[in-house]
Amino acid sequence: MKLLQKVSALILLSLALAGAAAEELPAEVRAAVQRAGLSPEEFHAAAVPLGPGGSGLGWNDRQPVPPASVFKILTTAAALDRYGPAASWKTVFYAPSGPDSRGSVGALYIRASGAPWLPVPAFREALLKLRRLGVRSIDGPVVVDRSVFAEPPVDPSAFDGRPDRPYNQGPDALALALQSLSFTFVPDAASGQARVIADFSLAGYSTPAAVALDADAPCPSNIGTALRPRSAGGELRFEGSYPAACGTQVWSMVPFPEASADRFDEALFRSLWSEAGGSWTGRLSTGRIPEGQRELLSLSSESLADLIKATNKGSINPMARSLFLLLSADEPGGATLRASRQRLLGRLEGLGIDTAGLVPDNGSGLSRRTRASARQIALALAAAYRSPWEPEFLSSLPIAGLDGTMRRRPVPAGTARIKTGYLSGVRSAAGYVRSRGGIPYALCAVIDSPRAAAGKPAIDAFLAYFASGRADQEAPRFSAAASASGVSSSGSTSTRPSLEITR
């Protein structure tokens, strides 16, 4: 909180540098909105210059709307401010004692840390270290202590009825492989098949070695529409055929969508422990670690800087939801959504940002209840830009024309770092654009409309307008717009900026 209070004065300075914000959409943006069949009221935008010169913009920017994945900007920035970019979390392994003369331990306990992601290679290496410590067999259960999170498990079918999709997974304190299994499809024209390579094996769960290849079908935007997974009785099969036009691609799914995290973790633990040469005949469950256990080893997560990069560039909902819960990990009894919502709002209010109407819900944006305004998001971006962890935060956002969800967007390559978002009826983008004249802007645009899917060109036009440098020299067109940017018409700052987030 102290850091945010120090930064708040710099945000007010940003607003003063902005001068009066324009109350009118640039002509090319308005034209793109109209071509998409949208009304101007369905387009929400805010922009704040982050250096001398330039013209701010506020358009329908105070209305709280569903922001989709752009909300991850607020969650990841809050996590960086709470913990710092070098933070990491430890998964710790315990047993009643060290291995006996036969290399046996009676039980194995794993204290989950709440780290947003525990990759399979890191977990495999931890089990190999257990073997090198002399553990050959586990004679009792494996118990995972997930009590760092006090929230009950999320229903993965609640949002859209697709519990097998990784984006619907809730936060899990162990986060082993995010409960998901990835497959690489490699077309082989000679055999008329596509080879299927699973990232790892799950004990008691079989996957196909190949699927039929379709030489004529176009490549769909989602491989899951061409190959429909069917998982039952410990066996996965794909119905349909793989389009050769897709080339080599990776596709992920949740193998046990209706089961608890214990089932996936047990199948993966059993497979990796056997692979390491260990034996185990017990079961895995969730529980508490008894007093007096001996620590065998600990496994550190990647740094928070790396974790938020994966979260934002890949727009990974389960990771964002875990980061959001970690905001209140010091709560007695474990982290809760309620406490994390209060922590996030408190950090924004410490910057002088009016949080009226802002609803964080689960912190990922995958929610119909989440609300924020374009102006709130733009101000949060301004705060991040002037923070000590600005380099790590900026590096987490997709680069226009180069990577992530911005790789194919028609914004001049390298001029913008933008997080995008979409839900049915929502399209959004927020981040930073550096103009041709060298002025950086923090900005956010959201379309909230049943016709939102057609609106990406309008958002691209908004980003391109600021990248072009046209806003650098334009004088404010309406003095009344000054109040929308937290700046009076005389140039003095108001006591509380009123920028909000609109999605």
Image: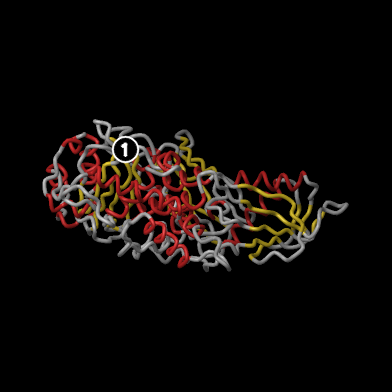
Instruction: Tell me the quarter of the image containing the C terminus.
Output: bottom left
Q: Which secondary structure lies at badge 1? A: strand
- Report which quarter residue 391 is drawn in: top left
How was this image coloured? Answer: secondary structure
Total number of numbered labels? Answer: 1
Q: Position of residue 281 (x, y in %)?
A: 74, 59
Who's the residue at 22% across and 59% down the image? Answer: 450
Q: Position of residue 186 (x, y in %)?
A: 48, 38
Who's the residue at 30% across and 55% down the image? Answer: 376
**Residue 218 left/right relative to 20:** right
**Residue 464 left/right relative to 223:** left
Front residue of this view, candidates 382 and 26: 382
Instruction: Tell me the quarter of the image containing the N terminus.
Output: bottom left
- 490 to 362, vertically: above or below: above
- Report which quarter residue 260 is drawn in: bottom right
**Residue 72 left/right relative to 94:** left
Residue lying farthest to the right in this orientation: 101
What residue is shown with label 1? 416
- Report which quarter residue 394 is drawn in: top left
The amino acid sitting under disc 1 is Ala
Residue 227 showing in the rendered view? no
Front residue of this view, candidates 486 and 21: 486
Q: Position of residue 488 (x, y in %)?
A: 19, 52
Label 1: how many residues lie within 10 Å, few (<14), some (14-19) or many (20+)?
A: many
